[in-house]
Image: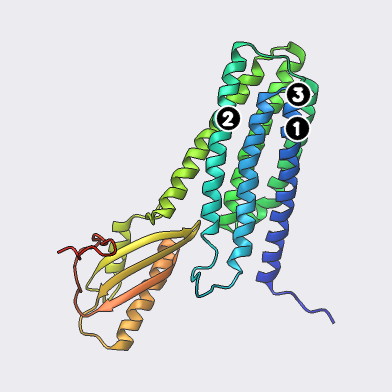
Amino acid sequence: MDHPHHPSRTRGELVRRALALAVALTAVVLIAETAGGIWARSIALLSDAAHVLTDLVSLVLSLGAVLLAARPVTKERTFGWHRAEVLAAMANGLLLLVVSAYLVWAAFLRLQNPPEVRVAGMLAVAVAGLAANGFIVLRLRGHAREDLNIRSAYLHVMADFAGSIGVVLAAAIMLPTGWHIVDPIVGMGIALAVLVGSLRLLKDTTHILLEGVPPGIDLETVAEVIRGVPGVDDIHDLHIWTICSHLYALSVHVTVGERSAPARDEIVTAINDTLRLRFGIIETTIQTEQEACRTDELIHLVPHRGDPEPH
């Protein structure tokens, strides 16, 4: 007798398999473009390889997030291993910053005296990379509609697919014309895109590690929405931060006046439902109070350990 699989479990397994295949194919493309770029003396191909590296790390992070999310929390790590994704992303950003800066400099030097590029080999590797990226895009497209984490990886691969098209076009131009200066021009364009992406990645990861409010969420708007929940008189001590991509947390003190314990529980439940539906915030700590304790400010200075409380 066949036993039907649980739908969510089946979907999760399909996502893991799609990501694992994407990681394997992207790693092959990275090796091929790096080796091919060195052999063909193509800075465009090497720049695209750097772009592929960003995609590989993004795919590994997405796969890692799926696997780590399933790991149990411990007394030492009450949020589990979610932050490992942020640390890996920061390391990736630092590596790409160095690599892309070097490729921009190398492309600049080649603009002065463009060397002869082995165009046929460059074109063959670029076409293979384009085909592999196209296959990955097709495999991830369906899952990208359902999962924000997969959507992020999907967009990375789409960007690299566009980069591969650029390399193919550069080779197609050089093959009949012999205009080898096209290679460093295209290479510099791709390297600059990777450089900008690495700076943005470092900015985003630093913001997360500094417990910043997640992008796209306005603290004042969240405050007004909470104040609009029936039974809430006012709020203070509001904190919103990011644990990892797409996992947001919030803590807040809520003044509710003289209400019974069941009434307070109903207010907390209503706040949680509102935060989940409006902002995607699912990790919350809500403290209800008869009147404001310590301060009635929406946000306040958090004293460093050993410092006196601000008055």
Cα–Cα span, label 3 and label 2: 18 Å
Does the CB distance between marks 1 and 2 fall below 8 Å? Answer: no
Residue linked to disc 2: 191
**Element type where label 2 sits in the image:** helix
Residue 25 position within the rendered picture, expressed as x and y whole percent measured from the top left: 75, 46
- The amino acid at mark 2 is Ala
- The amino acid at mark 1 is Ala
First in sequence, mark 3 or 2: give its number. 3
**Element type where label 1 sits in the image:** helix
Viewer-nearest of labels 1 and 2? Answer: 1
Looking at the picture, tell me which residue is in the foreground, 261 or 104.
104
- The amino acid at mark 3 is Ala
Residue linked to disc 3: 40
Cα–Cα span, label 1 and label 3: 8 Å
At 40% across and 70% down in the image, what residue appears?
284
Compared across the picture, whether 203 is left or right of 303 comes to: right
Residue 79 position within the rendered picture, expressed as x and y whole percent measured from the top left: 49, 68
Residue linked to disc 1: 35
Compared across the picture, whether 47 is left or right of 302 comes to: right
